[in-house]
Amino acid sequence: MPDDGATLLSDTVLALSERAPAVVAAAATELRGILLALRFGDGSSAALQAQHSRLVVTFGLPEASDVEVWFDDRSMNVLFDLQHRAVDEVLPGSLDVRGERSQVLAVWRVFQLLSQRGSGLRSVQQLWRSYRQRSPQLWGDQGLAGPGPADSAGLGPEPILGESGWSALDYLARRRPSTDGPGRERIGGTVVESARSLWDGHRSTDWWDELRVRDADLLEIMDVCRARVAVEVAGLIPDRSPRQDFYDLLRDYPARRGKGLRPTLCIAACGALGGRPLDAVRMAAAMELFHNGFLVHDDIADESTHRRGAPTLHTSHGVGLAVNAGDGLNLLAVDAVLSNLESLGLGRTLGLIHEVLHMCRETIEGQAMELGWIRRGTVPSRDTAYYTMSTKKTGWYTCITPCRAGAVCAGQTSPAVLDAFVATFRLVGIAFQIQDDVLNLIGEEALYGKEPLGDLLEGKRTVMLLHLFRTAPPAEREELRANLLRPRAEKSQADAEVILDAMRRHGSIEHAIALADRLARQGVRRFEEDLAFVAENEHKAVLRQIAHYVTTRPL
């Protein structure tokens, strides 16, 4: 439960970064270049600024700021509802704003985005409700003291409009998410429905009118998709002998909690194009089996020691059994694809086979490119070489093929329709991989799930390494090359730290972060252009959030 206004701000930004990345990216665009200082009536304070497409909250007041805002509890209330024009909200002793005019207006647009779109998330509503319940007397909040009458569906107490003093929250608490219609199945999660007015300087719309662009709670939906597909994967692995040396090993990597990105993309793409999301679950499970099989083999080739916070399969069971388990996972994946024949029919199943064959070819080619560079001691000079390798090795099976396969599950086999996903999710996939590479260097091991600096020990050709070799002076470059060429078994953490220090000194990490942000924003633009033919619906909203997720997740 947030104890003060500054903590509430930080918790809200964190929740939106995880659950509605598109909202954070839009707000960061408005705030870019502005340092906002916020002081709250409870004595707390914080600074808010944009870093690339992220919003960053720092507790305490900065020494200098571009815009300063002071809230008391009453102004926090009206800000969340945001039902009036900006000029009507500024009251003496309640809400004070100081700064240059254009920057103040930009800050107000940030507040509009966070309230109109972000506050529609149930998790954000709960954060703000908890904050209010801490001191209900400040809000005239008598409605929360006792339950209201049961609603017509018998789902429990129904908030009473007008009694809580926070009308937008009460409205959303009463409003039930829409269904997908007869015969349609939801993929889980909450769809954000607008309940805020939009003041554009000329007119305002009623606060219950729906926005053109819908948002979805990405974290909740990814949890649902991951859990549903995990059940499917578990059912695809036979309960038979030999358990200890084969089938138990097949269950190992799938049981380690991943992000759920591939299942979510596959299921959402199916729903976005008019299919039943349930029809994509088997294919999403097949994608997860392929993914985990690739990981087992990848870890062996890279001599990795950890995967998702635990020892790699070959470290625990030996290379032979691990190779065999990887083969088994790929075999089960093929069988899972073919089993769609019963439910999806011949045409769609043939389409899925075509997609899988193409994906496997791209992945193997990409792996060969990277391993060849490492074997020959080559460091490409241009980032475009990394783009090609990354797209082949991980982009197809992480982003592009899940979307195309989901579309096939919906009955779309037209090359024009399927190709509409390629440009967007190629860019998003490259950006996602660059960020994963950055996280390997500066992320928390508990969150990243791999050994610290593992990519440097393995000699992986990341964007940071390419940038370092372009910018380091010749003498330093030769020292770094000698470090890089040593076999993995002969390297230590100290060797990796030498390369990391050089990357920091030459700006290679910041180059990679900025590059990932730029590529992801290009991908978002292509999403809106190339997928404009897809009607706005809950499932398309999920795809949009994933496109933004790359730029907003914490580093």
Image (tube, rainbow, N blue to C red):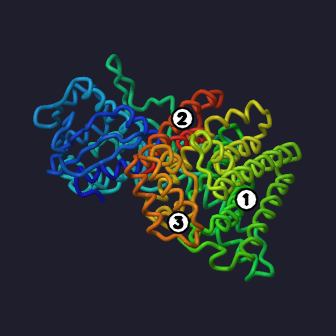
Residue type highlighted by circle 2: Val
Relative placement, left or right, of 350 versus 47 is right
- For this orientation, the residue located farthest to the right is 346
Q: Residues within 10 Å of mark 2 (few under 14, many from 20)?
A: many
Q: Can residue 514 be seen in this view?
A: yes
Q: Distance between the residues labelled 3 and 2?
A: 29 Å
Q: Distance between the residues labelled 1 and 3?
A: 20 Å
Which residue, given by chain and number where applicable, does mark 1 sit on? 290
Please name which of the two marks, 1 or 3, marks the residue nearer to the observer.
Answer: 3
Q: Where is residue 342 in the image (x, y as percent from the top left)?
A: 86, 54
Which mark sits nearer the N-terminus, 1 or 2?
1
Q: Where is residue 3 in the image (x, y as percent from the top left)?
A: 24, 58
Q: Which mark is residue 450?
A: 3
Q: Can residue 159 be seen in this view?
A: no
> Residue at 45% across / 49% down in the picture?
553
Which mark sits nearer the N-terminus, 3 or 2?
3
Which residue, given by chain and number where applicable, does mark 2 sit on? 524
Relative placement, left or right, of 339 versus 309 is right
Q: In this view, does 546 lie above or below 133?
A: above
Q: Residues within 10 Å of mark 1 (few under 14, many from 20)?
A: many
Residue type highlighted by circle 3: Lys
Which quarter of the figure has residue 552? top left
Relative placement, left or right, of 73 versus 462 is left
Residue type highlighted by circle 1: Phe
**Is label 1 in a helix, a strand or a loop?**
helix
